[in-house]
């Protein structure tokens, strides 16, 4: 994705950000991290 930049919404104080649509490296997330059911989970990062 050379024309895109990704910034973690957690870097901002505004809690009104939309929930994540995709979680990359989901296989490495902590068990306590809860994401919405509709979030697409990818075990790695796509090419």
Image (cartoon, rainbow, N blue to C red):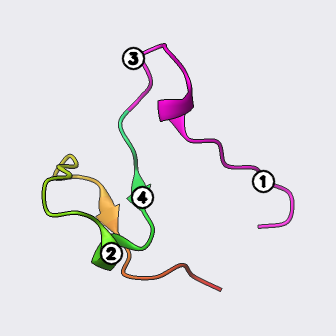
Q: Which of marks 3 and 4 is in front?
A: 3
Residue 8 x/y as whole percent: 55, 41
Span of residues in magenta: 1-18
Give the residue number, with chain letter if any, for mark 1: 4
Front one among 27 and 47 = 27
Residue at disc 2, secondary structure: helix
Q: Which residue is drawn at 42% across and 74% down?
A: 25
Q: Name the residue under label 2.
A: 28
Secondary structure, mark 4, is strand
Report, in whole angstroms, how far the alpha carbon at label 2 lies from the one at label 1: 23 Å
Nearer the N terminus, badge 3 or badge 4?
Answer: 3
Mark 4 or mark 1: whose residue is earlier in sequence? 1
| Residue 17: image location, x then y, percent | 44, 24
Q: Is residue 41 left or right of residue 7?
A: left
Cα distance in 3D space between marks 3 and 1: 22 Å
Foreground: disc 2 or disc 1: 2
Which residue reaches farthest bottom?
47
Q: Are marks 3 and 1 in contact (CB under 8 Å)?
A: no
Q: In which quarter of the image is the C terminus?
A: bottom right
Q: Residue 15 carries which label?
A: 3
Quarter of the picture holding the N terminus: bottom right
CA–CA distance between discs 2 and 4?
14 Å
Q: Which residue is drawn at 49% across and 14% down?
A: 13
Q: How far is the residue under mark 4 from the one under mark 1?
A: 15 Å
Residues at marks 3 and 2, CA–CA distance in whole angstroms = 24 Å
Residue 22: assigned label: 4
Residue at image x 40%, y 15%? 16
Residue 40 in the image: state x and y as whole percent.
33, 63
């Amino acid at each position: 994705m050379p024309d895109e930049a990704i910034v973690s919404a957690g870097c901002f104080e505004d809690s009104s950000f939309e929930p994540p649509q995709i979680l990359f490296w989901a296989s490495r997330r902590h068990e306590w991290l809860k994401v919405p059911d509709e979030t697409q989970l990818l075990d790695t990062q796509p090419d």
